[in-house]
């Protein structure tokens, strides 16, 4: 590959939710040694980098997104030396390691917060966001927590409220305080020195809040059945202009080390999302593009969102695509198990860096969680409207042995129903399986730079077929995705002929594609074109 390009432009990232990947010590919860054990699987799959959701010390109120020590590993996941061994072995196999950095809030058990709440005059008081009660009593303003209720928690001992955008056990740090910024830069350097290749930064668009603490305005589009925090527009709590200066500082810190990647978790409309590339591209390298997580699954909608995204990118800004993560329903649940194969081809043939969510390569379903097994604090706080995130976090289905080979103990979340037949070992042996589709796509993508870094150009607009070119030098590929369950005819441009290099239906690979090709329902094709 072109040596002048940074590694992540042609890389495929694989997200591991560590609690659910592989347990190595029989406690029903995945861990670092489990990941190390499964590196050969990841090599065989063909991914380039793993992003591991938080493994730092934590009371686990939000399963690791509430950190009580940013520079140590939680015993549930192992030790620092387990982490070093994982990184060493991943690197030896050519796999990069990306950590989850959670700077917006810590745990209320973090030493910084314990000091901060000790007294109003504590030197760390201003490391968090403390306010007096409103004049008549009650919370300082109307800000709401993402996980339900007021975002302000009263601390009786000191008579003030602290702000928490998520759980009350996740107090927000004060990023307007330069000491916080410096402490966090040291956290980044700690891991960078250990050789990590980058960070995914949690809720980066939340970092700075309004200095005047103004009330958020009501959301006129709010309706019952949506999470309660959506009743307000988060005008004064997220996406403030000042956040870009903070991000530029984080980026400069990462740039102190060669070849490191900074990704930002940002849920915003595309025109505001792309601002996170930063002035002169000095922001995050990849502001996560979540557009595919909510799109209506039809060809026109997807084609126009690709066009909108490509059109909004700043000069030199590198695109990226996400189909699932630990907060959103599984793709196979959203579009159905057959269409999930088409979605896989979409993810792995778009221009830019794709992120695969663990288990999607097996077609893992969205699992219905019985009420008594709900673990997600969001679902517990705001029950019954479908916000629960446990269903996309169930244990990886490795093989047909007890607990799907995930653990010898009872797993922390239930397994999906059909794990005894739908698991990595069985799927690996079936040439037509989802796992082998992912493997074939990843291999082709690696061998064919047109698919990762080539240009993107859309073909004719169509209700049912999503069709686009990927081109680089002499390579011209046409990707055709049938988003329906009915056969669809694709008519190639006059004078062009093609050959199917990869079909979601494996047996068509290598078939010639004269002027017209018929795609079966839920079929996707990558066609190499010749002729003008
Ligand atoms: C991010 C994480 C989510 C977590 C939240 C609070 O959105 O992806 O899992 O609950 O931040 O840290």
Image (spheres, rainbow, N blue to C red):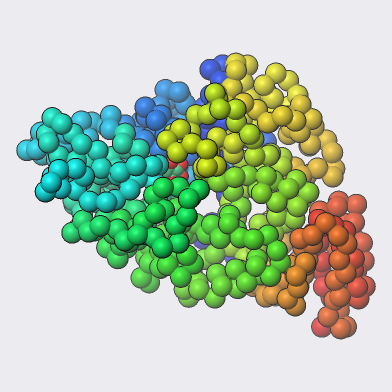
Asked whether, in this view, residue 332 is left or right of residue 181, the answer is: right
Outermost residue toward the left in this view: 121
Query: Could you tell me if residue 21 is visible in this image?
Result: no
Give above or below for 448 relative to 456.
above
Task: Give the percent coordinates (x, y) of residue 217.
Answer: 31, 61
Q: Quadrant of the C terminus?
A: bottom right
Residue depicted at x 39% and y 49%: 229
Indicate the quadrant where residue 412 lies: top right
Q: How many marks?
A: 0
Name the quadrant of the N terminus: bottom right
Residue at image position (66%, 57%) is 347
Q: Is residue 396 above or below residue 14?
A: above
Please tell me which residue lies in front, 231 or 433: 231
**Residue 291: percent from left, percent from top:** 56, 60
Give percent across and percent down for residue 188.
34, 45
Name the one closer to the observer, 437 or 402: 402
Ligand 1 placement by image quarter: top left
Q: Is residue 303 left or right of residue 325?
A: right
Residue 260: give x, y in percent of width and height: 44, 53
Q: Residue at x 50, y 48 (%)?
A: 225
Q: Is residue 140 visible?
A: yes
Q: In this rendered view, identify the residue nearer to me: 240 or 79.
A: 240
- From the viewer's perspective, tell me whether residue 145 is left or right of residue 365: left
Q: Is residue 109 left or right of residue 136?
A: right
Q: Residue at x 37, y 27 (%)?
A: 59
Q: Quadrant of residue 94?
A: top right
């Amino acid at each position: 590959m072109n040596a002048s390009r940074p590694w992540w432009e042609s890389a495929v990232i694989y997200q591991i939710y560590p609690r659910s990947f592989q347990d190595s010590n029989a406690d029903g919860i995945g861990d670092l040694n489990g990941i190390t054990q499964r590196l050969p699987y990841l090599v065989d799959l063909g991914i380039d980098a793993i992003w591991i959701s938080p493994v730092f010390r934590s009371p686990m109120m939000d399963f690791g997104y509430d950190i009580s020590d940013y520079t140590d590993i939680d015993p549930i996941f192992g030790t620092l030396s387990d982490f070093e061994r994982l990184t060493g072995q991943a690197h030896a196999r050519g796999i990069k390691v990306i950590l989850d950095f959670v700077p917006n809030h810590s745990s209320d058990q973090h030493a910084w917060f314990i000091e901060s709440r000790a007294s109003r005059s504590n030197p760390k008081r201003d490391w968090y966001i403390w306010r007096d009660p409103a004049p008549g009593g009650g919370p300082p303003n109307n800000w709401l927590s993402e996980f339900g209720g007021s975002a302000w928690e009263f601390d009786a001992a000191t008579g003030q409220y602290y702000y928490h955008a998520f759980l009350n056990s996740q107090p927000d740090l004060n990023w307007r305080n330069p000491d916080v910024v410096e402490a966090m830069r040291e956290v980044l350097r700690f891991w960078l020195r250990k050789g990590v290749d980058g960070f995914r930064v949690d809720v980066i668009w939340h970092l700075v809040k309004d200095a005047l603490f103004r009330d958020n305005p009501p959301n006129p589009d709010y309706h019952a059945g949506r999470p309660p925090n959506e009743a307000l527009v988060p005008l004064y709590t997220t996406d403030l202009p000042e956040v870009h200066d903070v991000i530029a500082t984080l980026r400069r810190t990462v740039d102190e080390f060669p070849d490191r990647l900074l990704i930002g978790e940002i849920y915003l409309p595309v025109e505001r999302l792309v601002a996170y590339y930063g002035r002169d591209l000095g922001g995050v390298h990849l502001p996560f593009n979540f557009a595919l997580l909510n799109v209506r699954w039809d060809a026109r909608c997807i084609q126009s969102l690709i066009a909108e995204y490509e059109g909004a990118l700043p000069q030199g800004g590198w695109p990226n695509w996400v189909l699932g993560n630990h907060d959103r329903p599984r793709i196979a649940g959203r579009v159905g198990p057959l269409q999930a194969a088409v979605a896989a081809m979409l993810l792995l043939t778009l221009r830019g860096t794709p992120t695969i969510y663990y288990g999607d390569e097996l077609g893992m379903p969205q699992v219905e969680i019985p009420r008594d097994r709900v673990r997600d604090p969001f679902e517990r706080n705001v029950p019954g409207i479908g916000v629960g995130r446990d269903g996309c976090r169930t244990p990886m289905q490795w093989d047909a042995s007890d607990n799907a080979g995930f653990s010898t103990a009872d797993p922390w979340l239930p397994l999906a129903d059909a794990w005894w037949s739908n698991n990595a070992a069985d799927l690996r042996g079936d040439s037509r399986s989802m796992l082998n589709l992912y493997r074939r796509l990843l291999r082709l993508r690696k061998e064919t730079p047109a698919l990762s870094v080539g240009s993107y150009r859309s073909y004719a607009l169509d209700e049912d077929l999503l069709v686009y070119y990927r081109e680089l030098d002499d390579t011209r590929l046409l990707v055709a995705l049938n988003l329906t369950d009915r056969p669809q005819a694709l008519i190639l441009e006059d004078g062009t002929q093609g050959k199917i290099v990869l079909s979601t239906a494996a047996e068509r690979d290598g078939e010639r594609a004269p002027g017209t090709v018929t795609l079966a329902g839920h079929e996707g094709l990558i066609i190499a074109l010749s002729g003008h």
